Amino acid sequence: MNTSRLFLTYCLFGLIPLTRGFWLKRVLLRWSGASIGSNVRIASSARFQLTGRLTVGDDTWIGHDVLVIGGDADVMFGARVDVGPRATIVTGSHEFVVASDRAAGRGFSLPVTIEDGVWIGAVSTILGGVTIGRCSMVAAGALVDRDVAPGAVVGGVPARELRRASGEASA
């Protein structure tokens, strides 16, 4: 991502109503270097602060105050993904150094992949190096620090599998 263009994009995002002007947001993010699919809807308060590649698949919703932050690792949202408000995706971290005057050692970044049809609940956190499988659900407030199987429902801190999604729609 081009960080200078990304900065200008956010300045312009602030002038667009939160849930309007989706076409303009797609154009601005593409101009910044992201790969954005068709009919992607992003709330104006969402922020992408990374130098890696950002890919967002068709028909994806990224909600209010979502934060994607980290270093040079890639973040990929598949098609038909729904990301709830204030969800956070963090690609960067640090090595843990015991024999030092500072616990946070050398920084590193790991990619995040969110496959097609995933639902990420409000205020959840996804850490680097994680793949969230197709049509799975991350419960609100969960901390995902390992891969999620396709069709799984996960929740908690750290997130653990609560159940598998059934093939039937809920009433």
Image (cartoon, rainbow, N blue to C red):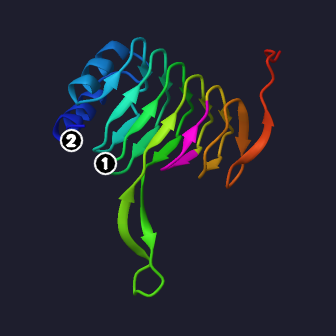
Q: Quadrant of residue 82?
A: top right
Residue tagged 2: 3
Tell me the SS state at disc 2: helix
Q: Report x, y in % for residue 17.
A: 37, 21
Q: Which mark is residue 80?
A: none
User: Marks 1 and 2: which is nearer the front?
Assistant: 1
Q: Residue at x 54, y 19 (%)?
A: 80
Q: Residue at x 37, y 38 (%)?
A: 47
**In which quadrant will I find the N terminus?**
top left
Q: Residue at x 42, y 12 (%)?
A: 39
Q: Report x, y in % for residue 71.
A: 33, 51
Q: Residue at x 64, y 41 (%)?
A: 148
Q: What count of labels does the image hold?
A: 2
Which span is picked out in magenta?
125-133
Residue tagged 1: 72
Question: Which of 134 and 43 lies nearest the eye of the viewer?
Answer: 134
Amino acid found under the numbered disc labelled 1 = Asp
Q: Earlier in the sequence, mark 1 or mark 2?
A: 2
